Image: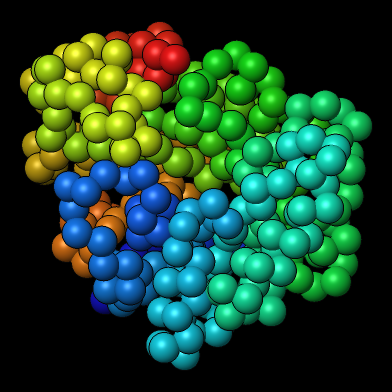
Amino acid sequence: MPLLTGKTRLIKRMNIAVTELGFGAWGIGGLKVGADTPIRGEEALGAYLDAGGNFIDTAAAYGESEAIIGKTLADRGVKDGVYVATKTKNGEFADTLPGIRRDLERSLAKLRRDYVDIFYLHMPPEDDTVIDAALGECEKLRAEGKIHGVGASIKGPAVTSETVDLCKKYVDTGRVDVIQLVYSILRQKNLAAIEYAHGRGVAIVARTAMESGFLTGKFRDGFRFPDDDHRQRWNDAVDGIVSAVERIKAKFMPPAYGSVGQLAVKFALIPEGVTSVIVGAKNATQQRANEEIAALPDPDAEIVQSLVATFKGFTGQCNPHE
């Protein structure tokens, strides 16, 4: 049986079951992702589908990502049973509200679909009046059948108390089905938002579980990202993060695990409110490595408790130093 088949969780407000490991499609779009790994998007997504994965996360801002997804699904004749989420770049401010519909129409054309399953506000507004208007635009699109669910992808790259508050504000509207947010071993601050959303029936999709590659364990003290890599915002924080990762390697690795990255993804799936963790892959080799995580046992409670106790207050140190 394919590794991801049957490993699903429910988005309650939409009554759909998505695989615990989602396909994060930023990397295949080719924008500011570094040149260290070959990008072969169609084969990466194909490997994910072959493994039984059914939840694809993309955005209008992800370069060629939507077009690659559209072509791959069309070439494979995939129409049902695979859920696609995309995001609008517009809606943060009142003057960009008309762009929400334009973004969706362009996304649908690239994806070669009549609708998307989840449509996120990628830069969700903070002003109450604009929130009401932006969600109203999304609800019009849902009434037209062009989207099935409404979401808010809560801003990054930093995670702060304001991040948590914004998550709660969107949950309290009663008008979103899904919240996407940053959650990892090293940035646990959003756990309060996860628990809050879960208590009110709103699904959580966790992103950045591997912290943009830091929790793969491949970086060393003194490493710095080049200017054409979006992760250069973390350059002043690299050494502290690398030290934390080395500590995880030395003290907290379950016996069956081969990498910190595997532990990172499993950790992000532990909270009851997390429906799916989106994990990126630029080619089939990376995707197959991600799939192997699904076959691993959950880390035992003692390891989880130790990770929580050790890194609960680490979020600020893992945020980019602007």
| Residue at figure coordinates x 10%, y 24% from the top left | 220
Foreground: 303 or 182? 182
Residue 49, x across and y down, in percent: 36, 74
| Residue at figure coordinates x 19%, y 37% from the top left | 216
Residue 111, x across and y down, in percent: 56, 74
In which quarter of the view is residue 270 placed? top left
In which quarter of the view is residue 119 placed? bottom right
Residue 277 can be seen in this image:
yes
Answer with left or right where residue 191 lies relative to residue 220. right
Foreground: 318 or 238? 238
Answer with left or right where residue 114 lies relative to residue 277. right
Residue 81, x across and y down, in percent: 53, 77
Residue 279 can be seen in this image:
no
Answer with left or right where residue 158 lies relative to residue 46. right
**The C terminus: image quadrant:** top left
Q: How many marks?
A: 0
Residue 139, x across and y down, in percent: 85, 56
**The N terminus: image quadrant:** bottom left
Residue at the front extreme of this rendering: 227
Q: Is residue 198 above or below residue 42?
A: above
| Residue at figure coordinates x 74%, y 37% from the top left | 92
